[in-house]
Structures are given as C-alpha cells and as structure tokens.
Amino acid sequence: MTAITVTSPAYLAGAVGQSATGDWRVVDQERIDLFADATDDHQWIHVDPERAAAESPFGGPVAHGFLTLALVPALTAGLLDVGGTAMVVNYGLDRVRFLQPVLAGSRVRATTVVESAEPTPQGVRVSSTVTVEIEGAPRPALVARTIALFVPA
C-alpha cells in the first residue's frame, strides 16, 4: 500500500494531484450474500451461484454495484493520512460510474487521486477520484468522485 501523508488538514492543498493505491481485498460469495441480506436485494445474479454460472452473461455470481461502492471506505482507509485531524466526515459523492461487474471471488483494490482541497469554516473539504480495479481485468469496477471533510483537532 502507498499513502499520501500530510501533518494537518491545513496542508491538504499540497496533496492535490497526488495518488495512492491500497491493498487487494477479496469479494467472496459470503460477503455478497451478507450484503444481499442487509439490503434485501437477493437477485439471482448475486446469490445463486449455480444459476448465475448457467444463465448470466457474467459466467457466475457478481457483487452488487452498491456493495463495491460500499467497500470504498475500507479500500481507501489509510491512503490519505492526515495528522492533527479530530474526525473525517463523509460529505458525499459527486459522480459514480459502475464500469464492470465484480465476479464473486475476485480481488479488488482502490487508487485515490486528490483532486481538490478547499478550506471551509469547519475544516478542509477534499474531493478525490477513487478507482476500484479488479485484479486482471482490463477495466475498473467503478470510478467515483468522493468528498470528505477533514476537521482539525
């Protein structure tokens, strides 16, 4: 894993343009099934491995797109290390595109690129482009523009 490190939110402007890449993480059938239970989305392409292998265009079960998106905080944890921070608040998303399904058993990882750092009265609002890639795949699973507020200690 690589990381972008700054000593305080005040120095986040210096991180603009920098990127960091996280470690690989497996998206297994158990995780997909748990997500299906949590969201009540039990579509067969996600939770029926036999049917998905036989009938889906993907050749097997795939993770929900929103599961892949929900993994972004875990996949990017530690990629932007900001000292002197009391808390980091998820401010939202500007854009999300699901580009390729994640087959059960695949490994994914995230790369984040800091796009902007804007001071606000509460802290520094950082926009980043996060790309979740699938090991061995020609296209990423998703690309999202995330926004976080870094509140100084």
Image (cartoon, rainbow, N blue to C red):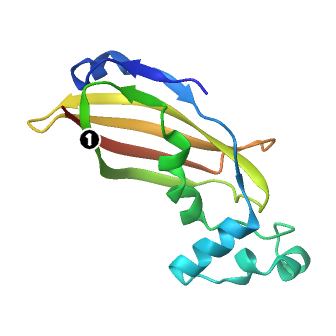
Residue 124 position, x and y percent, is 21, 32
| Residue indicated by mark 1 | 87
State the residue in front, 150 or 62: 150
Count the marks.
1
**Residue at point 75% right, 68% down?**
29
Q: Quadrant of residue 61?
A: bottom right
Q: Quadrant of the N terminus?
A: top right
**Residue at point 62% right, 73% down?**
34
The residue sitting at the right extreme is 54
Residue 33 position, x and y percent, is 67, 75
State the residue in front, 10 or 43: 10
Q: Quadrant of residue 117?
A: top left
Is 13 positioned to the left or the right of 32 in the image? left
Is 35 positioned to the left or the right of 12 in the image? right
Q: Secondary structure at mark 1?
A: strand
The residue sitting at the left extreme is 121
Q: Residue 25: tell me if it is visible.
A: yes
Residue 8 position, x and y percent, is 26, 21
**Tag 1: residue type?**
Met
Bin the neighbour count of mark 1 within 10 Å (Cα to Cα): few under 14, some 14-19, many 20 and up. Answer: few
State the residue in front, 138 or 52: 52
Q: Quadrant of residue 59?
A: bottom right
Q: Quadrant of the C terminus?
A: top left
Residue 87 position, x and y percent, is 26, 41
State the residue in front, 80 or 130: 80
Q: Residue 17: tell me if it is visible.
A: no
